Amino acid sequence: MDLLSSINEPPEYSLIEKQKKELNDSIRYASYIQKALLPSQKEIDRYFTQNFVLNLPKDVVSGDFYWFYRLKNKIIFSVADCTGHGVPGAFMSVLGISVLNQIVLSYKDISAGGILDLLREHVMKSLHQTGAAGEQKDGMDITLGIIDFATNQLQFAGAYNPLYIVRNGSLIKYDGDKMPIGIDPVEEKPFQNHNILIESDDMLYMFSDGFADQFGGEYGKKFKYRPFRELLIKASVLPIKDQQELINQTFNEWKANESQVDDVLILGIRHVSH
């Protein structure tokens, strides 16, 4: 900037620029904290030898998060999509991770559905949700699984979000309950616990809705879930890292010049019997 332009620059302009820089710096620092709360790839590899995590935040920080916990022969793992994205979503993700850690440390023998029941209770209490008119309906949609490697049994529970298992080229969909982690407009019922016998080489997929809801393509429409399921079936036969590359490439080609509408998170796990 030359001397003349700095003299002519209104004082409020430089103040706004300074405030904007400070805000961006704060958000970038918040992203480092959020990433530190997520399990590292090295840690995930210790749980599951064949896995990928495609994590594409819409903004610097994300309202989507993934979470893992080891309990003897069992691995508990989850993908969640919090209300909003950016800073508000990131606040919710930190709350979700903190509460999940608290639950598994307090209850050593608990079902997937039981974890979601307690998570909902803690979130409602933390956000002071009572169901009053005009109250914020913040919360999260989530998929949670518990694999017992001794028996190859998978427990699954979901708040809105489903679990997909691709086996021998066929996709099996397990639906989550149609209620959120948070206040429900009707009634908070216990989350259903699904017990699934999984086989070696099964591909398990958990995800947020960001990919299916992305606008793009020739007509600028949503990607939607049927093509998303077809993409996962196509990807499932590939080596695990090639799956991630194919899904990421498909997303970028679909989105093209459109703005990303939401956070995107996809977790893929190939089950290997121990």
Image (tube, rainbow, N blue to C red):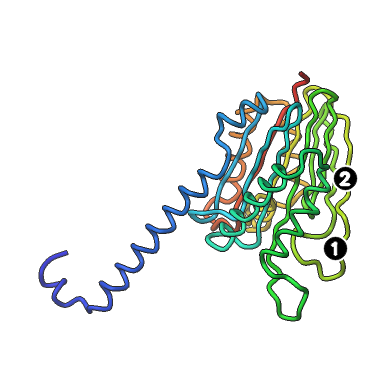
* 14 is higher (above) or lower (below) than 57: below
Residue 193 — which label?
Answer: 2
Q: Picture quarter containing residue 136?
A: bottom right
* 146 is higher (above) or lower (below) than 274: below
* 57 is higher (above) or lower (below) than 150: below
Q: Position of residue 127 (x, y in %)?
A: 67, 67
Q: Position of residue 157 (x, y in %)?
A: 82, 46
* 141 is higher (above) or lower (below) than 233: below
Secondary structure found at label 2:
loop
Residue of label 1: 188
Three-letter amino acid code of the residue under disc 2:
Asn
Residue drawn at point x = 54 percent, y = 59 percent: 86
Residue drawn at point x = 76 percent, y = 49 percent: 225
Give the side of residue 61 with respect to residue 78, left or right: left
Give the side of residue 96 with respect to residue 199, left or right: left
Residue closest to the far front: 106
Secondary structure found at label 1:
loop
Q: Picture quarter containing residue 111?
A: top right
Given residues 248 and 96, the one toward you in this image is 96
Disc 1 + disc 2, Cβ < 8 Å? no
Q: Picture quarter containing residue 92?
A: bottom right
Which quadrant: the C terminus? top right
Three-letter amino acid code of the residue under disc 1:
Glu
Residue drawn at point x = 83 percent, y = 47 percent: 113
Residue drawn at point x = 48 percent, y = 49 percent: 33
Give the side of residue 197 with respect to residue 90, left or right: right
Q: Position of residue 164 (x, y in %)?
A: 79, 40
